Amino acid sequence: MMLELGASVSAIGADAWVWVMNFLVLIVLTLAVYMFAMREGGAGVISLNIALYCGYAIYNVFPYRDEIVGIGATPLVQAVLAVALFLAATALPFLIAMRLTAPSFGQLSFFQGLLLSLVAAVFLLALAFHVFQISDIYTFSDPLNQLFAPEGYFFYWFIAPLIGLHFLAK
């Protein structure tokens, strides 16, 4: 009986480890977003989600985007330039959104903050796959590829932060 229980626990532990390793990029990105955004309280994660949309819009319409990204001789340098340009385009909207949301939002619960960080992380991962072409320089796990690589899924990952904000930022 104890051997069967030990074998079951070992199998569950092994399965959990495989799951964690398959989604490690998403887990680390979610925790990084959570740590960054929660420094400012509830307004931080809400402002970040809003700023990601603004940053994406500014990045897309920036007239010199292709020239700047094209400076890179390798896919790695091009991806780094694209991400840096996106971060620069997101910084000012984040500061503006913080100024607008900070007075009206207190603290979010741990659960709310973590879920809003998760939807921001999936949005960033979707951008990494479809806009920044990170998959050309980094090999993601098969489960992440199945979730983020199909072109038709980009729309759903794109609206995930909006849905999260609607239900969790009240």
Image: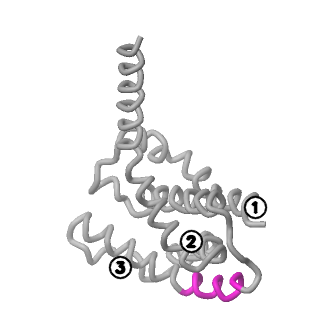
Q: Is residue 95 magenta?
A: yes
Left/right placement of residue 104 relative to residue 78 reads right
N-terminal-most mark, 3 or 2: 2
Left/right placement of residue 75 relative to residue 31 reads left
Mark 3 neighbour class, 10 Å CA radius: few under 14, some 14 to 19, many 20 or more: few
The quarter in which the N terminus is drawn is top left
Q: Is residue 105 above or below residue 166?
A: below
Left/right placement of residue 89 relative to residue 1 reads right
Residue 2 image offset from top left, x and y in percent: 39, 15
Q: Which residues are magenta?
A: 92-102
Farthest residue to the front: give it.
2
> In front here: 32 or 97?
32
Residue at 68%, 73% (x, y): give it: 107
Secondary element at image label 3? helix
Residue position marked by numbered label 2 in the rendering: 52
N-terminal-most mark, 3 or 1: 3
Mark 1 neighbour class, 10 Å CA radius: few under 14, some 14 to 19, many 20 or more: few
Residue position marked by numbered label 3 in the rendering: 67
